[in-house]
Image: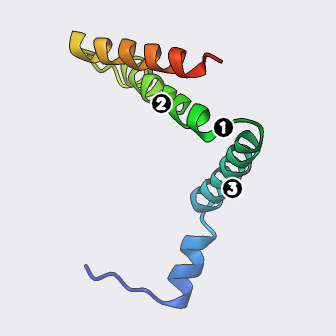
Amino acid sequence: DRLSFNADSILKLISSPYIISGIILYSLATVIWLYILSKENLSKVYPIQSICYILSVFIGMYFFKESIPLTRWIGVFIIMMGVFFVSLR
């Protein structure tokens, strides 16, 4: 099966609800990120983004029924402590 890239297939791809939703969400996230950066220092805000790593562990555990080993929980704890210390004034 050969991939064909013509104007019709590209237009169909671009007009996909998944692509449009992704562009909207990415744009919204960018606007929010720029707003946050205008209010706080990068050296404080950027490390706090690592909370996403913690959320991904819980998403994997609850939605995908992944088993989380003790070493990963220790890593989650270390990340949480790092976020705590970075967020102190």
Q: Which residue is mark 1?
A: 41
Q: Secondary structure at mark 3?
A: helix
Within the image, what quadrant is residue 11 found in? bottom right
Q: Residue at x 70, y 43 (%)?
A: 37
Q: Which residue is mark 2?
A: 50
Q: Marks 3/2: CA distance? A: 20 Å
Within the image, what quadrant is residue 3 found in? bottom left
Find residue 50 and report its horizontal and vertical position in percent. 47, 30
Q: Secondary structure at mark 2?
A: loop
Within the image, what quadrant is residue 48 found in? top right
Name the one closer to the observer, 50 or 2.
50
First in residue order: circle 3 vs circle 1: 3
Quarter in which the N terminus is drawn = bottom left
Badge 2 amino acid: Ser
First in residue order: circle 3 vs circle 2: 3
Name the one closer to the observer, 48 or 43.
43
Q: Residue at x 50, y 26 (%)?
A: 51
Badge 1 amino acid: Asn
Counting other residues with Cα less than 10 Å from the Cα at mark 1, is it few (<14), some (14-19), or many (20 or more)?
A: few
Q: Which residue is mark 3?
A: 27
Q: How is the image coloured?
A: rainbow
